[in-house]
Amino acid sequence: MITRWKLDKNVAVVTGASKGIGAAIAEELLQLGATVLAVARQPEALQQQVQAWQAQGLAAHGIAADVSTAAGHTQVRQAVADLQLPCGILVNNVGTNIRKPTAAYSPEEYQYLMATNLESVFGMCQELYPLLRETAGASIVNVSSVAGLTHLRTGAIYGMTKAAMLQLTRNLAVEWAPDDIRVNAVAPWYIHTPLAAGVLSNPEYLQQVLDRTPMKRIGEPAEVAAAVAFLCLPAASYITGQCLSVDGGFVVNGF
């Protein structure tokens, strides 16, 4: 029973892991016994975070790489290979947003959001697939958003990327099931993160968010991390192709 709730001897790759939800996911997996390769673009913030985990005796490693690029994918794969341990988990968490009306986006902004939020996920799945299929019970978890399930005032491109991520999750879950790779997603609502801090600092907007949230509060990164960790565990071995909303009831809320 205990082994169903542990991740011993697994390498878990977590993108966007230097802060916010990504850092919380990495820490949760570390506490469950995984060896975590934390990936982020900013080397200074990443190094500080990895050193903090190492000081706690946790098996944390870091690689500064831009996973919106093919070169970044290759860097991550090489870093995993250097650890010389089975790679059993990939968490695609990296993401960003530019909030604008649809007609106001420039082509450069469109390409930036698509590359960061969506192409990074596709590329990382492709790059690590050969390693994941060599590990029994491998798991991929994609961090989507409720913006991929319903309309939000976060911008059309952000919603597009998160919805496409969910379809990729479903496709890969079926395609890679014979390889013993499970693929799932989580869809958070507003969480206390640096990405959400700007809009939530507006009292009127914050109240509107709380009014639409049955649990009447903003979520915490650790609450998303717990859902991600569950989907990675052997305890979730018969769950694939699913999207778990971590949203305080937002998506199912009616009038």
Image (cartoon, rainbow, N blue to C red):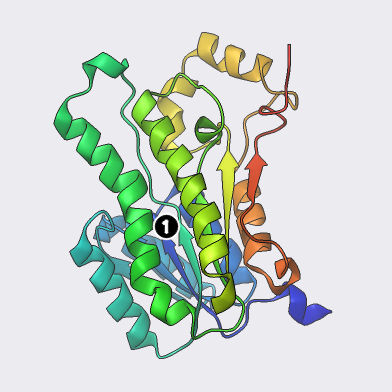
Quarter holding residue 146: top right
User: How far across and down, in percent of the image, does residue 73 sit?
Assistant: 27, 66
4 or 38, nearer to the observer = 4
Label 1's element? loop
Q: Is residue 46 left or right of residue 173?
A: left
Q: Is residue 145 placed above or below 135 in the rendered structure?
A: above
Residue at point 68%, 23% (across, down): 213
What residue lies at 49% left-to-right and 86% top-to-bottom? 134
Q: Is residue 191 above or below residue 14?
A: above
Q: Is residue 70 above or below residue 246?
A: below
Question: Which residue carries the number 1 mark?
Answer: 17
> In which quarter of the view is residue 62 placed?
bottom left
Name which residue lies at 70% across and 33% down.
248
Residue 61 visible from this viewpoint: no
The residue sitting at the right extreme is: 1
Question: How many numbered discs, if any?
Answer: 1
- Give the amino acid type for the residue marked by disc 1 in the picture: Ala
- Where residue 156 appears, x then y in whole percent? 38, 25
Say whether residue 236 is left or right of residue 158. right
Q: Position of residue 225 (x, y in %)?
A: 60, 54
Q: Residue at x 75, y 27 (%)?
A: 215
Q: Position of residue 100 (x, y in %)?
A: 31, 19
Which corner quadrant holds the C terminus? top right
How many neighbours does mark 1 have within 10 angstroms: few (below 14), some (14-19), or many (20 or more)?
many
